Amino acid sequence: MAAPRILLCGDALGRLNQLFKRVSSVNKSAGPFDALLCVGQFFPDSPEQLEEFNEYIEGRSKIPIPTYFIGDYGVGAAKVLSAAAKDSANLGFKMDGLKVCENLYWLRGSGKFLLQGLSVAYLSGRQSASSQQFGTYSQDDVDSLRALSEEPGIVDIFFTNEWPRGVTNRSAASVVPSGKSDPSIGDSTISELVAEIKPRYHIAGSIGGYYDREPYANIGAAHVTRFIALAQVGNKDKQKFIHALSPTPASKMSAAEICAKPPNTTLSPYSSAEQTGSGNGAIKRSGDSVSDTQYWRYDVSQKRQKHGDGEGDRLCFKFVSSGSCPRGDKCHFRHDADAREQSVRGVCFEFLNKGKCERGQDCKFKHSLQEGKGFSSRSGSGTGSSNRSKECWFCLSSPSVESHLITSIGEYCYCALAKGPLVQDHVLILPIEHVPNTLSLLPECEKDLYRLQSSLQAYFKSQGKEVVFFEWVSKRGTHGNLQAVPIPSSRASSVEHIFNLAAKKLGFTFATVKNADDNNSGRKMLGMHLDRNQSLFYVEVPGGTILSHVVEENEKFPAQFGREVLAGLLNMADKADWRNCQLSKDEETKMADNFKSQFKECDPNS
């Protein structure tokens, strides 16, 4: 396949007649081109230019090729972009552009997407201390881009509204544009980002002037980066404002092609000799020394070092948006499964991260927590009303219940295999009544649950296994579920130790109570002291000891705590997130049928 053909342009400033006349001419003589990427201010500087600009926005004049822009400020920007944001076609999480009109796409905030096979990343708008709705980028946008940059593969093109500060460092004086060699010119945040992302091409505008810098070597990467800045459309100095590019996607290149360095390659403008050191030249970000072999990844002291005071609670955008993060334990931001699940249900990332959204009613995402679904093996079943709901996937009366996973039904409780199980016979014990947790059951319901617990213990003991029971009791819980995970008997003596170790790393100590075998006295004691305005995690380890921890109001407790600790104990770190373990419905049905057949002799409801 032929390499994609891309046109780049600087600040359009609303001069769309001149811009698209030139694009059409170039497209006819040297094209066809696949897309036009605009950096710098896209909207007009003055109201007098709005008539020309609106001819295109309102469809009376045609845009010749797909056009993407990031400079979302200028006269008329608020009106046009507000309308685009409210358009039903632009709802959802869209990093490949919100459609403004035919062939025109607004790249809002930050993101990464594929364009004709090219990996393209962007940061829209300018840096500002204010919270303007359009035209500026936020810290969330920066954090999101950092998370996205950790994905495997090389970013082909990174384009930003402004120059990165210091980009002219180590550049030959003869090629630096007049008045642009001052190292203080530009945005230092963009410098940090481009040093991390290491794109093959970095395109910028807004400062005014054309500058095609020599390629520079990246620290910790084999390929070079080329920086190109473009002048304003129709500038008086007749500097170049449009540039053609036809790069082969890095994903299609050989290692030799990627590693090739032109003769005029310089050192990185964003590093000093002191930073590169005598090793491989990679800049280590704080927190990179965390061991990948740790059982537990929530070390409070290390998180404080990574984030700085007051900054350690921000969510990882990559994890929330996709369900995984390539940095794993070394990520600077919080991997919160509950936040990920809320995001899947359409809750605004900024609302999840800050508790508020500056976009207000212009934001098309939800600004309230949504109720959970499914026989998920996560701790906690979501948030929302505790009233019976047809949307609750744990209620047997619900049309949404996944009945193929149910293995045993009693008078007050039932069993179902977990969705995305940690191990093959990972079981959930659930009350038939729609109650927020299993510690609030009436005595007759508690007896039914105890019978199922005892039966599971007997069943797994016959297989040379012990059972760990745990529950995340959220103050916002909807339908309680007690998880039962079988482990080899040889690991049973380590369970209490590993949970205590995990607690220590999170900065708390478990309260301990003994659960007598004959009457579940430990569970009853927890239930008696349960405060509905607090959340609680508890785990019953082999031998009957119950470890519990009341989660304080502002304490950030990982929703999958129980599962992740056991994943570490069983050397199954990759299965810590249930979404990595999902099976097809046929596989789930077969697994449930096998369990029912083998459990039949021990099943009190058989």
Image: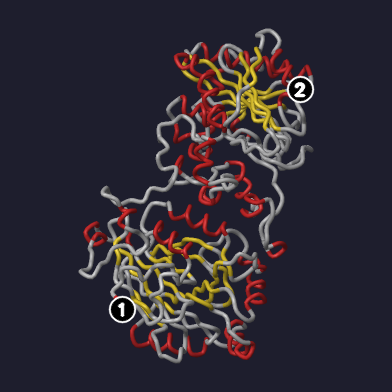
> Which residue does the image show at 57% across and 42% down from the upper left?
336
| Circles 2 and 1 in contact, beta carbons < 8 Å | no
Q: Which of 309 and 556 is in front in this view?
A: 309
What residue sits right under mark 1 in the picture? Answer: 175
In which quarter of the view is residue 603 placed? Answer: top right
Residue type at tag 1:
Val
Q: Is residue 507 visible?
A: yes
Q: Can residue 606 be seen in this view?
A: no
Judged left or right of residue 437, residue 506 is left
Disc 2/disc 1 C-alpha distance (Å): 73 Å
Q: In this view, does 387 lie above or below 407?
A: below
Q: Which of 505 and 395 is in front in this view?
A: 505
In which quarter of the view is residue 75 placed? Answer: bottom right
Mark 2 residue crowding within 10 angstroms, few (<14) / some (14–19) / many (20+): few
Question: Which is more foreground, mark 2 or mark 1?
Answer: 1
Q: Is residue 382 above or below residue 87?
A: above
> Which residue does the image show at 32% across and 56% down from the upper left?
219
Judged left or right of residue 604, residue 244 is left
What residue sits right under mark 2 in the picture? Answer: 529
Mark 1 residue crowding within 10 angstroms, few (<14) / some (14–19) / many (20+): few
